[in-house]
C-alpha cells in the first residue's frame, strides 16, 4: 500500500481523480491557512504587547536558532533513526524531568481539588458523588482513580505525577518523530521532533497535574497505530482495533476522542474515493477498518463506564451530566468564550442544568451573524494568539521563590521573558506548519495517510474551539497534531534553497 510512485493514490498505480485532488487540496490548503492564521494572530499580539526592539529580538533570535536546527538536521541518515528516537526520548526525559523537579508547582483550582479527592479516595473506597463536582462531571472520576491507585500503593505525591507527565511528553515527542517519518525526509522528521521537544509551550504544563498529557499521548498513539503500514487486511484491522483501544483510554482521561474520530471519518471518505476502482472489496476494507476503530472505542468506553459504576466509584459512570456547558461558555461574548460565574449560577443554580444550558445556547445563537463571526475571531485571537499562560505553572510559591532569587524584576520579569521568547518560537513553528501544508499539496506527503489524518485532526480541533470554551492551555494537543507537518515545511524549504543555489551558480 505504501510502496507507490508519486502521483498515485493509496490504491497503487491508479491516478488521482478530480474528487480526490479537490478534497486533498481542501485538507492541506485549509490546514496551511489555519496555521498561517495562528502565526499571524500570535505575531500581531507580540507586536502589540512588546516594544519594537524587544519584538524584533523575540522574532529574530528564535528564527536564527530554528534555522540552525534545520541545517543541523538536513543530512540526517535514516538508518540511524532508532538511535535518534532513543536519544530524543532520553534527552526529553532528563531535561523536562529536571524542569519538573526544580519548578515546585503546586496544584491549584480544579487541579488541587482533583488531587485532594484522589488522596481522600486512596484512604478507602468512597462514592465520588458525595461531591457535587462529580455529579456534574462524572468523566473526571477516571483521572482521580488513576491518581488514587499509586497514592494507595506507595504513597505517590505531586512529584511522582509530574514525572509521569514528563514521561508522557517524552513518548509524545517520539510519536511526533515516528509520524513525521512516514511522509517526510529523515532530516525533516528529526527537525519536527526537536521543534516539538524544545518549544517552551510543551514544557510549561509539565509540572501541572492536568489530565492533558496522558490524553494527548494516547490520542497521538491512536493516530500512529491507525496509520501503521500493513500489507494485509487482518493486520490493518488489528491495528484499527488497537487504535480504538488507545483512543478510548485517552478519552477516559480527557474527552478529546471526537477530534480523532471525525478526522478518521473524513479519511474514510478519501479512502472510498481512492479505492472506488477496486470495487466493493476495497470499499468494504476501508469501511471495516473505520468501523472497527469506532466499535473498539465505543465498546471500551462503555466498559470503562460500567467499571466505574459497578465499583461504586461513581453511579453515573464516565458520562457528562451537562455536555452543553462547554458551548454555553464558548458562545459567551462577555468572556470571549471563557468561563462565566454568572452562567454557572444560572445553569447549575437548582433547576434543570441541560434545559437552562440549551436556553442560553439558543439565545446566544440568535444574535446577528456578524456578532457570531466577531466572537469566533476574538476566540481565535484569545486561544491561538495570546502568549503562553504561566498561571498554572508559576503558582504562588514559585512566584515567591523567583522574587527571593535576586532576579531583576523578580517573577514578573521572568514570566514576561518566557512568554515573549515562546511567542517568537510559536510564530516560526506555525509558519513552518503552514509551509508544510502548502508543500503537502504536492509530493509524497499528499498521498500519505498519516499526513492527512494529522491535518484533518488539527482542523477538527481548531474548528470545535470556535464553538466551545477556550483556554490557552488547551493548545497543547494542537502542538502534537500540527508540529509533525513542519517536517514537510522543512523539506520544502531545503528543496527551494537547493533550487535557488543552483540557479545562482549557473548565473555566476
Image (spheres, rainbow, N blue to C red):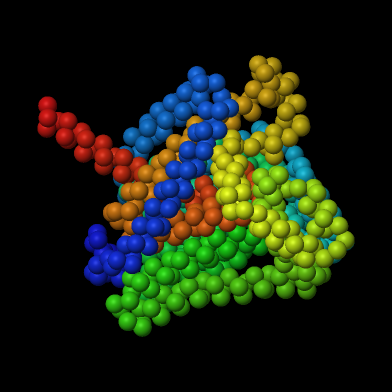
- Residue lying furthest front: 368
Say which residue appears at 32% left-offset and 62% top-offset.
Answer: 21
Residue 167 position within the rendered picture, expressed as x and y whole percent measured from the top left: 58, 48
Q: Is residue 349 left or right of residue 174?
A: right
Q: Position of residue 224 (x, y in %)?
A: 46, 60
How many callouts does the rendering have? 0
> Along the line of sight, which residue is nearer the eye, 361 or 57?
361
Quadrant containing the N terminus in the rendered view: bottom left
Q: Is residue 191 above or below residue 133?
A: above
Residue 235 in view, yes or no: no
Q: Residue furthest bottom?
A: 280
Q: Residue at x 26, y 40 (%)?
A: 496
Give the left or right position of residue 490, taking residue 298 as reference. left
Name the residue at 73% across, 20% down: 404
Q: Residue at x 29, y 40 (%)?
A: 494
> Image quarter for residue 383?
top right
Instruction: Locate residue 379: give its quadrant.
Output: top right
Amino acid at each position: 500500500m505504501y510502496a507507490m510512485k508519486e502521483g498515485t493514490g493509496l490504491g497503487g498505480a491508479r491516478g488521482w481523480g478530480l474528487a480526490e485532488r479537490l478534497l486533498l487540496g481542501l485538507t492541506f490548503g485549509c490546514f496551511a491557512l489555519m496555521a498561517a492564521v495562528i502565526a499571524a494572530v500570535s505575531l500581531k499580539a507580540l507586536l502589540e504587547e512588546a516594544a519594537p526592539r524587544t519584538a524584533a529580538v523575540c522574532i529574530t533570535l528564535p528564527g536564527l536558532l530554528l534555522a540552525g536546527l534545520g541545517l543541523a538536521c538536513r543530512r540526517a541518515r535514516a538508518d540511524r533513526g532508532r538511535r535518534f528516537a532513543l536519544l530524543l526520548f532520553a534527552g526529553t526525559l532528563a531535561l523536562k524531568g529536571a524542569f519538573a523537579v526544580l519548578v515546585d508547582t503546586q496544584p491549584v483550582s480544579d487541579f488541587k481539588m482533583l488531587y485532594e479527592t484522589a488522596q481522600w479516595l486512596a484512604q478507602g473506597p468512597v462514592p465520588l458523588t458525595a461531591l457535587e463536582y462529580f455529579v456534574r462531571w462524572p468523566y473526571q472520576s477516571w483521572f482521580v482513580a488513576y491518581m488514587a491507585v499509586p497514592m494507595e500503593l506507595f504513597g505517590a505525591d505531586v512529584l511522582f505525577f509530574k514525572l509521569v507527565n514528563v514521561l508522557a511528553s517524552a513518548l509524545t515527542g517520539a510519536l511526533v518523530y515516528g509520524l513525521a517519518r512516514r511522509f517526510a525526509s529523515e532530516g525533516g522528521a528529526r527537525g519536527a521532533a526537536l521543534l516539538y521537544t524544545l518549544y517552551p509551550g510543551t514544557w510549561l504544563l509539565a509540572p501541572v497535574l492536568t489530565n492533558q498529557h496522558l490524553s494527548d499521548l494516547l490520542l497521538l498513539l491512536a493516530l500512529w497505530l491507525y496509520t501503521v503500514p500493513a500489507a494485509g487486511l487482518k493486520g490493518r484491522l488489528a491495528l484499527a482495533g488497537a487504535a480504538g483501544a488507545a483512543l478510548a483510554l485517552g478519552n477516559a482521561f480527557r474527552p478529546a476522542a471526537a477530534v480523532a474520530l471525525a478526522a478518521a471519518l473524513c479519511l474514510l471518505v478519501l479512502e472510498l474515493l481512492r479505492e472506488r476502482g477496486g470495487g466493493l472489496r476495497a470499499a468494504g476494507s476501508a469501511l471495516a477498518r473505520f468501523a472497527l476503530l469506532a466499535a473498539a472505542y465505543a465498546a471500551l468506553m462503555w466498559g470503562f463506564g460500567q467499571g466505574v459504576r459497578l465499583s461504586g466509584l461513581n453511579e453515573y459512570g464516565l458520562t457528562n451530566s451537562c455536555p452543553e456547558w462547554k458551548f454555553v461558555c464558548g458562545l459567551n461574548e462577555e468572556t470571549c468564550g471563557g468561563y462565566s460565574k454568572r452562567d454557572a449560577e444560572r445553569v447549575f443554580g437548582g433547576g434543570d442544568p441541560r434545559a437552562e444550558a440549551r436556553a442560553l445556547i439558543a439565545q446566544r445563537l440568535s444574535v446577528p451573524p456578524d456578532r457570531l463571526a466577531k466572537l469566533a475571531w476574538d476566540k481565535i485571537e484569545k486561544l491561538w494568539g495570546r502568549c503562553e499562560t504561566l498561571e498554572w505553572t508559576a503558582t504562588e510559591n514559585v512566584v515567591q521563590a523567583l522574587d527571593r532569587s535576586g532576579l531583576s524584576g523578580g517573577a514578573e520579569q521572568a514570566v514576561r521573558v518566557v512568554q515573549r521568547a515562546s511567542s517568537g518560537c510559536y510564530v516560526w513553528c506555525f509558519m513552518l506548519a503552514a509551509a508544510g501544508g502548502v508543500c503537502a499539496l504536492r509530493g509524497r506527503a499528499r498521498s500519505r495517510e498519516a499526513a492527512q489524518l494529522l491535518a484533518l485532526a488539527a482542523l477538527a480541533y481548531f474548528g470545535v474551539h470556535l464553538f466551545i470554551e477556550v483556554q490557552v492551555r488547551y493548545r497543547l494537543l494542537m502542538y502534537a497534531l500540527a508540529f509533525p507537518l513542519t517536517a514537510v515545511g522543512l523539506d520544502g524549504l531545503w528543496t527551494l534553497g537547493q533550487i535557488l543555489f543552483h540557479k545562482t551558480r549557473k548565473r555566476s
